[in-house]
Image (cartoon, rainbow, N blue to C red):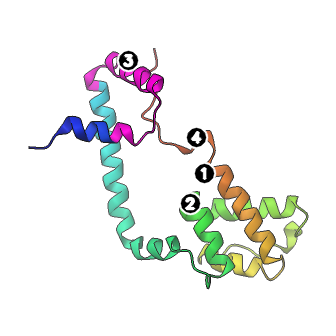
């Protein structure tokens, strides 16, 4: 039989909460009706299962992108930063990177190549023909940091409206 208390403790430990935060969480959990919490957990579980099934077709691609390589192209590096680490969709990643490059005065908006239906890395490799690679990587890193370290980047169970 599984030790469900140990599993729950491990999951809570992974949150890295301080003692006061843990105490607040436990008090909040006491106030939430069991049915509501059960529905939230079931919904998150279903979402994670759906994501897991959807992502199986791209596991090889993600594994490849997660392995930093000295031989990786600028496009591959930017794709890893924005799509894998910052979890941005291709269209959003290209739009945000374009916006930053234009605002930095590195390229005119009219000179940015259009995003085709191909991979982000290929589009970035075309951008690098007009903008220095180090500047594209710098902008991509700044964007990655904005999205990874933003307050909304963490998952939340939700708040109880009273």
Whether residue 77 is situated above or below residue 30 in the rendered picture: below
Expressed as whole percent of the image width and height from the top left, the position of residue 120 reads 62, 73
User: On the rendered structure, is 62 left or right of 112?
Assistant: left
| Left or right relative to 53: residue 137 | right
Query: Residue placed at 42% from the left, 34% from the top?
Result: 157
Image: magenta residue range: 11-35
* Dot 3: element: helix
User: Neighbour class for label 4 at 10 Å: few (<14), some, many (≥20)?
Assistant: few
Question: For mark 3, what is the residue?
Answer: 27
Cα–Cα span, label 1 and label 3: 29 Å
Q: Position of residue 66 (x, y in %)?
A: 50, 70
Is mark 2 in CB contact (under 8 Å) with mark 3?
no
x, y percentage for residue 106?
88, 68
Which residue is the site of mark 2? 85
Asked whether 15 or 41 is in front, the reply is: 15
For mark 2, give the secondary structure: helix
Q: Earlier in the sequence, mark 2 or mark 3?
A: 3
In the figure, residue 119 lies in which quadrant? bottom right
Magenta segment includes 22: yes
Identify the residue position indicated by label 4 in the image: 152
Between 161 and 62, which is closer to the camera in this rendering?
62
Magenta stretch mostly in which secondary structure?
A: helix
Q: Does the CB distance between marks 4 and 3 fall below 8 Å? A: no
Asked whether the beta carbons under mark 2 and mark 1 sit within 8 Å of each other, the answer is yes
Q: Are marks 1 and 3 in contact (CB under 8 Å)?
A: no
């Amino acid at each position: 039989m599984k030790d469900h208390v140990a599993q729950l403790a491990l999951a809570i430990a992974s949150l890295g909460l301080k003692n006061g935060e843990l105490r607040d969480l436990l008090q909040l959990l006491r106030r939430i009706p069991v049915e509501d919490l059960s529905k939230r957990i079931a919904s998150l579980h279903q979402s994670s299962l759906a994501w897991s099934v959807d992502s199986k077709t791209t596991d090889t691609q993600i594994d490849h992108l997660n392995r930093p390589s000295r031989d990786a192209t600028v496009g591959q590096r930017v794709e890893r930063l924005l799509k894998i680490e910052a979890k941005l969709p291709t269209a959003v990643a290209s739009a945000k990177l374009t916006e930053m490059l234009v605002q930095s005065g590195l390229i005119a908006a009219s000179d940015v190549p259009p995003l085709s239906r191909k991979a982000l890395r290929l589009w970035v490799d075309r951008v690098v023909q007009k903008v220095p690679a180090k500047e594209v990587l710098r902008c991509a890193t700044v964007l990655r940091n904005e999205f990874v370290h933003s307050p909304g980047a963490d998952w939340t169970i939700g708040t109880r409206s009273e």
